[in-house]
Amino acid sequence: MKKQNETVTKSRLGHYPVWFLIPLGIIFLVLYIIPTFSSLYYSTQRWTLFDSTFVGLDNFASFFNDPFLLGGLLNTFLYAFLTSGLKVVVGMLFGVLLMSNIKFRGLLRNIVFFPVLVSTIGVGLTFQELLRPQVGLLHQALSVFGIPEAGLLGDPGTAIFAIIAVDVWKGVGLATVIYLAGMASIPSDYYEAAKIDGVSSFQNFRFIVLPLLRPATNTVIILSLIGGFRSFDLIWSMTGGGPGYASDVLASLVYKQYQSGFYGLSTAGNVVMFLLILILVVPLNRFLTKREVEL
Amino acid sequence: MKLQAFKRKALLVAASSAVLGLSLSAITPAQAAPKVQITWLVNNTSTVTGPANEIIKDFMAKNKDIQVVLTMRPGGTDGDNIVKTKLATKTMDSIFTYNTGALFQALAPSKTMVNLAAEKFQSNVDTGFKNAVSVGKNIYGAPFGTVMGAGFYYNKTLFSGAGITSTPKTWPAVIEAAKALKAKYPDVAPICASFGSSFTAQIYVLADYYNVHARIPSFTANYTAGKAKFASTPVALRGFQKLAEASSFFNSDKNTMTRPGASAAMSNGTCAMYPWQTSFNATLTADAQARTGFFAFPGDSAGDYGLTTWLSDAAYIPTTTTGAKLVAAKKLVAFIASKAGTDAYVRANGYTAPFLTKDQSAAPDTVAPAVKDLAALLKSGKTYPALEFLSPVKGPNLAAIMVDLGNQRTTARDAAARYDKDVEAAAKQLGLPGW
Amino acid sequence: MKRQFKTRNWLLGLISLIVAIAVFGVPFLFIFISASKPLDESAVLSFNWPKKWAIIDNAVEVFGAHDFMLLRAFNNSFWLTLFSVGILSILAAMVAWIIERRGGRIAKIANFLVLAGLMIPPAVVPTIFLLQAIGIYGSFVSMIFIEVAFHASFTVLLFRAFIGSIPRELDEAAILDGANSIVLFFRVIFPLLKSVIVTSIILNSVTVFNDFVNPLYFLSGQGNETVQLTLFNFNAEYTQRYNLLFMDILLITIPMVIFYAIFNKRIVAGMTAGAVKG
């Protein structure tokens, strides 16, 4: 019995021809690989539509010198880690809730998951109106309880947090179903053994379920981190990166620089995004996967 | 085998439909002579699409062999980007309208547009305008729209209610008026800001230019050469400082209010003053226009009172328009700059200000108060074009910097310094000497 | 004890349902209500039921605006999704097949590139310039290929996981019967992939249909706008006309509602497929 991923014998090689890779390979190469490499080149240029001059690492330096760009870089970190953390915690809580025997489980799962499928632009524009100061629904609801309203999207200090909240609103459903799948794959023997040993439900959760959920947790962390670093649609539709630059992230800065015609700076932003993910997410993924418990 | 049969069937269907189609076309009566179709790309605000549609209507009535289709793009930086991209990828419409001055220069006109210097309609165009759409001896645009000024629109009823007897003619007077309004009407914002349309935040610096020029006539040249900066020139710094001073009187929803939102607020009386260009008046309701006045963006002392002016937008033809379409496009451009074209424009927006052409209809007798105020200012001769019409350099991030300043997240000096850096980046991008 | 348990579950379920509807359902209800109001009522963004039902009028007006731009946008979105997802499914399956079966150095390289594709954000501006150099920037075809390129990694991994469970004995049997590589893959293996093909079509359709940032960069102002782009542009135009804005949002959401209603289980299963295994 051959192992599944053993290299095939020479006589069989012809049946798994290399040219099968070519069609997708060409598209992938031309539209993704080549631009990624050329971005390394273009990020060192000052580049108009018609010509370019070499400026070394100036574009990258701007991300640390220019207060707007630096703010955007910091916002990106904030956005990625906060949304990731919240999705893990809230997603797990929802997962536990939906795993228990409460009524309306199926309906609840559908309600929580549906926002994941809806257009991000639609969600962004809807919440832009719901959160509108003085006239939006949130303000009306809060004023019923007599709570004065924070500036939310209109306040430079809170804009990014309002967007983070909406991002979690939209994405927690996916985290929840990932956790549900994770919990469903834990064999019931484990629960039974724990019951026999007289373990409380809290201990059960902490020492049995939680470690066995590590693959699910890791998936949620990695997926939402990468997504958070690259996030654009929600920010662009809710505030356009504003007020001013207050809620900008790397992706929106890349677009803004492109709009202004600063193509070199824009491409540098892409490279920074790429390096961030490479330096932070890849080692994190390796670290997290090592800690996964074998089922 | 099955494939063969299917192929034969398909061929039969295709052949018979071809025959049917051909015979049908033989029976139908001959079409009228084919029209030349050209497309015209404009900003999607109603104050632009309205006149454009009127112009097209009149033009097509006079030129039955040309069909003009209006296409739209957003305004602001999104629109700038779309125009630049379309020109760069050679997918621009037959003609398009866009700003004049520095923004026009950023489009690399000598590479992307058709030279219209030799066209007959140029004899009808004001010289001042020609400078804003030229590179050397080549002229690339025709005026679309009116002259504009920038200053403050104010609610006369609220002003008299707060005991403000004379129209502010100095900046300190504006602040005094704002204080009086705040005391008398706590629910009304003395000055409104519409940062939801971030490009409007720039007005404090851009509209202040008459005052800068009045004190330092050499600023323009030195600025373009990279020698004069906003942060280090006290008079030029004033624009930034004025926004900082005004920010304590802003409406609480300043960051989400859009420019149409400001029109609504001025119309229903929740705003007392709003600074913007004189295209603003046409966006107010008729009732509101009857009680809204206009004064120029004032300097610090009474003798400095004058109007910073904006030249109108222009209609340009990209080099990708050729042959019969080019002939048609040139005709449309000539029409836009003619008396008939400006008449059509007035039909849509009402009379707001003079056009930049020599032969145009006189202003009607009854106009809104703000329009009268503007006309008086233009007549006084104390006007000067905004910096972007005299210098090709304009930093693209002024709006965002001003929004930050308007939110009191930075100081006027820091904002000005930041803008200087932005201007430097733009100048280097344009490849200007001396930067 | 059991009855207490049952009541507790019932109560907890009810409370959860109310909270869930309040948090997750209210925004959608708001969209529907606002989309049904006539212009004068919609100016105030309140939650009350429309006094006059204008849902048909609003739909007609939004569809007809700018020469039926929304209709054309739906058309564009539909064909873009169909073509890119279709092409992707076939080509990605082929690549996954080779990586999984052939092994060796070539497969290792391909695998590495696929994983890189998951993490590295696409460099859009250089891609724009490359497309302009070729001369196809802004064209519908170029957008199809871009969606294929940007979703390739995910789809290949999806197929790979599934192909791993197809026993090699099947290959051997087909080869001994005289099948060449094409017959082997397209006649023997492809039909077995039906389940994962459907999953990839569904998941990719959702992502491509909802894609905003890529059409923003590659299709802006070129006349091929998708519904997401049109919605965004309408927002600038429809300030103060909330009824039309929300009607547009409603129209974009409806396909997803239908999609979810039909493919509920598959979507959830697909999205969690690789997740638990890591």
Image (spheres, coloured by chain):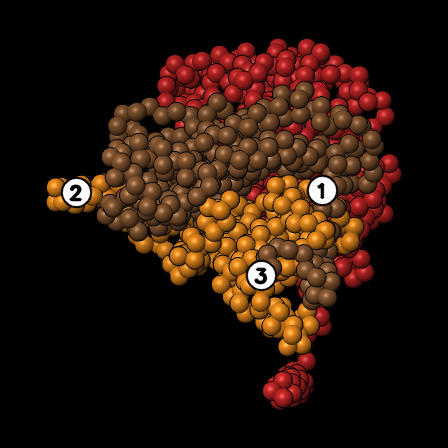
Q: Specify the chain shown as orange.
A: C
How far from the left and from the top, in percent, is residue B369? Answer: 52, 31
Q: Which residue is mark 3?
A: A1
Cβ–Cβ under 8 Å for marks 2 and 3: no
Q: Residue at x 45, y 20 (%)?
A: B190
Q: Which of these two is toward me, B333 or C94? A: C94
Q: Which mark is residue A36?
A: 1
| Residue type pointed to by label 1 | Thr
Q: Nearer the viewer, mark 2 or mark 3?
A: 3
How far from the left and from the top, in percent, is residue A54? Answer: 83, 31
Whole-number angstrom distance, CA of label 2 to CA of label 1: 58 Å
Q: Nearer the viewer, mark 2 or mark 1?
A: 2
Q: Specify the chain shown as brown.
A: A
| Residue type pointed to by label 2 | Phe
Circle 1 — which element?
A: helix
Circle 2 — which element?
A: helix
Please state, as top left, top right, bottom left or bottom right, where the N terminus of chain C lies in the image. top left
Q: Where is residue B164, by image quadrant?
A: top left
Residue at mark 2: chain: C
Drawn side of residue B254 relative to residue B110, left or right: left
| Residue type pointed to by label 3 | Met
Q: Earlier in the sequence, mark 1 or mark 3?
A: 3
How far from the left and from the top, in percent, is residue C11? Answer: 19, 42
Whole-number angstrom distance, CA of label 2 to CA of label 3: 52 Å
Q: Residue at x 16, y 45 (%)?
A: C6
How far from the left and from the top, in percent, is residue B355? Answer: 67, 39
Q: Are marks 1 and 3 on the same chain?
A: yes
> Can residue B120 be seen?
no
Q: Which residue is mark 2?
A: C5
Give the class, few, some or many, for how many residues have Cα within 10 Å of label 3's Cα (few <14, many ≥20).
Answer: few
Residue at mark 3: chain: A
Q: Are marks 2 and 3 on the same chain?
A: no
